Image (cartoon, rainbow, N blue to C red):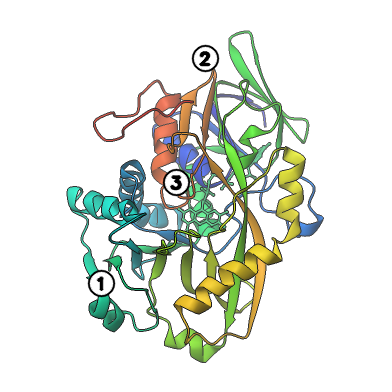
């Protein structure tokens, strides 16, 4: 590399960072995207991890939180464009359900979702009781559940393929991509300097730190982020070919049970790189905070907590009693939450911008969050007529 100076360097080639890099490059900004690829063997890896090392994330335009509904609407509307530019399909529009108790404690979850869907004119069907059971006979929902079903523009995305598509599109638009971890970011003589694991030093007017949970790591952002990172265990139910075929039209499901005891979400059958097909459930009942970078790395390497995994697996077998599966396995991941529920998209100094805190929904919304990060890095502001609240601590 002869020229190591850029207008903007995006640190973190994950869902948000790759999106920010594409938007910047397409705006004509001289852009670099710096971040490592996925490790080959998680259990043996001692460096940073990402929350997108998986084959499926739920996507839907309806959300109980207005901003997140709008982030996802904007992002989903651009999926086809990104797939075309990146030469990489990643969206499976199998539909999605969001569901929860219609009355009593916790009813604001589904009622807010319904209000947001109506306000933003997102096409959906409201189903309950007999209609819900007849329409989705594989699920046994308790009484008093209202389900909002989005038949189109919803389903799941492959987050790895999404990142690949964004990186290809960013490169086509002129972005420079360096597959390295960043060890340190400094501000000196009116610019930011990015020190990479391979010894490279890149310079730029602005640096966006989009390192997911690892944005909290020492040496990256100048100010500590009040972001909580939680350990998450996911349960994978392996299906045989016949069961996968039987459930091929299953939508993605987000479900708040009436006792509010957990926060489960279910992915329909998805074929994984090992050639097997799995239904996945996540949504731990207990939040276990990961304090330090070392704790995060250890957790990502661990493969999850079998007790938490068994508890969420029980939820799936209760909700889909007819489900036939060969085996159940677990894996670990981490989610990052801000105190006010918005993502962090703000300049910490003249040169360094934070772009993180997916609040459990950063995958489906990634392209819009990346666009907003690119906007802020180029001197713009997040439009208050669309998005409410603060994006800084
Ligand atoms: C189990 C689970 C299920 C989820 N399900 C959904 C879902 O159904 N729908 C949904 O919308 N969201 C879901 N999410 C949330 C979503 O995956 C995250 O919000 C999203 O991955 C956040 O994107 P990000 O770009 O901030 O972080 P990441 O995707 O984690 O990317 C961060 C990147 O930064 C890089 N990085 C870290 N440190 C450094 C460094 N020092 N130098 C350079 N690069 C670095 C990493 O390598 C990584 O590539 C789920 C999360 C989990 C854990």
Label whose residue precedes the other's in the sequence (2 or 1): 1
Give residue 222's quadrant in the image: top right
Q: Residue furthest front?
A: 104
Looking at mark 3, is its residue's CB closer than 8 Å to ligand 1? yes
Q: Establish if 299 lies above or below 155.
A: above
**Label total for image:** 3
Secondary structure under tag 1 reads: strand
Q: Residue at the far bottom: name it.
A: 242
On the image, numbered disc 2 is attached to which residue? 350
- Give me the C-alpha separation between circle 3 and circle 2: 24 Å
Say which residue label 3 marks. 366
How far apart are the alpha carbons under marks 3 and 1?
31 Å
Q: Residue at x 36, y 71 (%)?
A: 94
Residue 249 at x, y percent in the picture: 37, 79
Which residue is more in the foreground, 389 or 17?
Answer: 389
Q: Mark 3 or mark 2, which has the lower sequence index?
A: 2
Q: Position of residue 381 (x, y in %)?
A: 35, 24
SS class, disc 2: loop
């Amino acid at each position: 590399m002869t020229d190591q100076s850029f207008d903007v360097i995006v640190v973190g080639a994950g869902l948000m960072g790759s999106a920010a890099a594409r938007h910047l490059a397409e705006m004509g900004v001289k852009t670099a995207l710096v971040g490592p690829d996925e490790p080959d063997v998680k259990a043996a890896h001692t460096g940073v991890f990402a929350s997108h090392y998986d084959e499926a994330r739920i996507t839907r335009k309806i959300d109980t939180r207005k901003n997140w509904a709008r982030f996802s609407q904007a992002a989903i509307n651009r999926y086809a464009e990104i797939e075309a530019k990146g030469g990489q399909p990643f969206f499976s529009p199998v539909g999605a359900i969001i569901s929860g108790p219609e009355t009593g404690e916790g009813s604001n979850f589904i009622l807010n979702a319904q209000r947001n869907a109506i306000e933003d004119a997102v096409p959906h069907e409201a189903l309950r009781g007999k209609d819900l059971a007849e329409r989705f006979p594989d699920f046994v929902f308790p009484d008093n559940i209202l389900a909002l079903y989005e038949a189109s523009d919803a389903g799941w995305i492959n987050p790895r393929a999404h990142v690949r598509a964004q990186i290809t599109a960013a490169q086509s638009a002129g972005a420079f991509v360096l597959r390295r971890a960043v060890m340190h970011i400094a501000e000196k003589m009116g610019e930011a300097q990015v020190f990479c694991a391979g010894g490279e030093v890149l310079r730029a007017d602005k640096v966006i730190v989009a390192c997911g949970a690892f944005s909290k790591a020492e040496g990256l952002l100048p100010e500590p982020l009040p972001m909580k990172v939680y350990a998450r265990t996911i349960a994978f139910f392996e299906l045989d070919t016949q069961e996968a075929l039987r459930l091929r039209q299953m939508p993605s499901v987000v479900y708040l049970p009436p006792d509010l005891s957990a926060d489960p979400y279910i992915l329909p059958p998805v074929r994984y790189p090992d050639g097997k097909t799995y239904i996945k459930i996540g949504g731990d009942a207990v939040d276990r905070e990961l304090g330090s970078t070392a704790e995060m790395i250890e957790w990502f390497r661990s493969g999850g907590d079998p007790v938490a995994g068994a508890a969420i697996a029980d939820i799936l077998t209760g909700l889909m009693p007819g489900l036939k599966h060969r085996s159940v396995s677990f894996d670990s991941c981490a989610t990052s939450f801000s105190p006010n529920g918005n993502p962090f998209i703000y300049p910490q100094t003249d040169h360094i911008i934070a772009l993180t805190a997916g609040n459990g929904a950063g995958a489906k919304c990634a392209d819009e969050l990346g666009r907003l990060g690119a906007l802020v890095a180029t001197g713009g502001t997040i439009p208050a007529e669309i998005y409410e609240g603060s994006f800084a601590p």
